[in-house]
Image (cartoon, rainbow, N blue to C red):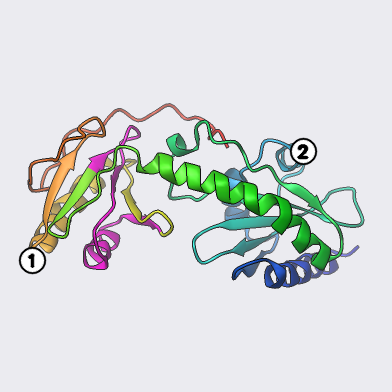
C-alpha cells in the first residue's frame, strides 16, 4: 500500500474512533515528516507490552494522537506486518515528573479491529478504564509534597529533579507563572518550572515575585519534606536545587 494511502487510512480511522469514544476526543495525524513530534511521542508511550515491543523493532513512522480536554491522550499506530487493524496505547502526560509514575501499573495498549466502531468499543471497554485509573494514581503521586497555595500566597516546592512545582489558588497567579516559564498540567492544576537551566530558573523566580506582589499575592519556597506551613518569603533568590538525577527511563 502506498504511503499516502496508509496515512489516509490511519487518519480516517482515528477521526471515526475519536467520534465514537465516550466524552469528547479530537484527533491529530502526525505524518512521517513530523520527526521531532514522533520521537517525543515515542518516549511518552505508556506501555511495557505489545506496543513497546513493536516500537523497539519499528521506529514510529506516523501516528494519530487522540486528545481529551482533561489532557488524556491516546496514540493510534499502524501494525507492522499486518494488513488489517491497528495498535492503540495510552500517552503519559508530559507535565508529570518521572517520580509520579513509580508503582503505577502501565495501562498497556491493545490491538484494534479494522472496524473503528468495533475499535471504539474495545477501547472504551478496556484501555480507557485502565488508563483513567493509572492517570488518577500518577496525578495523586505528583501532588505528594506539594502544598496547595492560598488566595494570598503561592507555595513553590522544590522537586527531587531540581524543578519547582506549585498549585496556585486561581488563574491570576497561574497566568503569571505560565508567562514566567512554568508549564501547567491541566488535569492536576500543577505548574512546573524546569531545573535544567538553573540560571534561567532563578531568573524566572526573581521575576514572578514582584508580579505576584502587585496582585497582593506573596510567595513561599519549601522542600517536599517541609510539610508545615512555610513562612511567607520572596522568591527573589531560590536555594540551590538538588543535583540533577541520572538519566532514567520512566517506569510506565
Q: Position of residue 121 (x, y in %)?
A: 77, 61
Q: Is residue 206 magenta?
A: no
Going from the N terminus, do you reach mark 2 or mark 1 first? Answer: 2
Q: Is residue 62 visible?
A: no
- Residue 127 sits above or below residue 1 on the image: above
Residue 209 occupies quadrant: bottom left
Question: On the picture, is 60 further left or further right than 248?
Answer: right
Q: Which mark is residue 203?
A: none
Q: What secondary structure is found at the residue carrying circle 1?
A: loop
Q: Residues within 10 Å of mark 1 (few under 14, many from 20)?
A: few
Question: On the picture, is 148 further left or further right than 24?
Answer: left
Q: Nearer the viewer, residue 17 or 212?
A: 17
- Residue that label 2 marks: 57
Q: Nearer the viewer, residue 168 or 82?
A: 168
Q: Is residue 52 visible?
A: yes
- Residue that label 1 marks: 214
Mark 2–mark 1 CB contact (< 8 Å): no
Q: What residue is shown at x 8% (from left), y 61% (from top)?
A: 213
Magenta residues, start to end: 157-185
Q: What residue is shown at x 75% (from left), y 63% (from top)?
A: 120
Q: What residue is shown at x 16% (from left), y 60% (from top)?
A: 151
What is the CA distance from the residue labelled 2 to the residue labelled 1?
A: 54 Å
- Residue 21 sits above or below residue 39 on the image: below
Question: On the picture, is 232 further left or further right than 168?
Answer: left
Q: Position of residue 248 (x, y in %)?
A: 50, 30
Q: Position of residue 84 (x, y in %)?
A: 90, 57
Q: Position of residue 161 (x, y in %)?
A: 35, 34
In the rendered image, the quadrant that contains the C terminus is top right
Q: What secondary structure is found at the residue carrying circle 2?
A: helix
Amino acid at each position: 500500500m502506498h504511503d499516502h494511502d496508509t496515512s489516509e487510512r490511519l487518519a480516517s480511522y482515528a477521526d471515526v474512533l475519536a467520534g465514537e469514544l465516550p466524552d469528547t476526543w479530537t484527533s491529530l495525524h502526525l505524518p512521517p515528516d513530523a520527526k521531532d513530534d514522533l520521537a517525543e511521542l515515542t518516549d511518552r508511550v505508556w506501555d511495557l507490552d505489545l506496543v513497546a515491543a513493536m516500537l523497539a523493532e519499528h521506529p514510529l513512522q506516523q501516528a494519530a494522537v487522540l486528545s481529551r480536554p482533561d489532557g488524556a491522550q491516546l496514540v493510534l499506530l499502524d501494525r507492522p506486518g499486518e494488513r488489517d487493524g491497528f495498535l492503540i496505547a495510552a500517552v503519559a502526560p508530559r507535565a508529570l515528573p518521572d517520580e509520579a509514575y513509580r508503582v503505577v501499573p502501565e495501562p498497556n495498549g491493545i490491538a484494534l479491529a479494522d472496524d473503528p466502531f468495533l475499535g471504539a468499543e474495545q477501547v472504551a471497554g478496556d484501555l480507557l478504564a485502565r488508563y483513567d485509573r493509572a492517570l488518577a494514581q500518577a496525578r495523586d503521586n505528583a501532588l505528594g509534597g506539594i502544598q496547595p497555595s492560598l488566595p494570598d500566597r503561592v507555595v513553590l516546592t522544590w522537586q527531587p529533579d531540581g524543578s519547582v512545582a506549585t498549585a496556585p489558588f486561581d488563574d491570576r497567579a497561574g497566568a503569571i507563572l505560565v508567562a514566567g516559564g512554568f508549564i501547567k498540567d491541566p488535569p492536576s492544576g500543577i505548574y512546573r518550572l524546569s531545573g535544567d537551566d538553573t540560571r534561567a530558573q532563578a531568573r524566572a523566580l526573581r521575576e514572578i515575585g514582584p508580579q505576584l506582589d502587585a496582585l497582593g499575592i506573596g510567595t513561599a519556597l519549601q522542600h517536599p519534606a517541609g510539610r508545615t506551613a512555610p513562612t511567607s518569603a520572596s522568591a527573589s533568590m531560590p536555594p540551590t536545587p538538588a543535583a540533577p538525577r541520572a538519566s532514567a527511563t520512566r517506569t510506565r
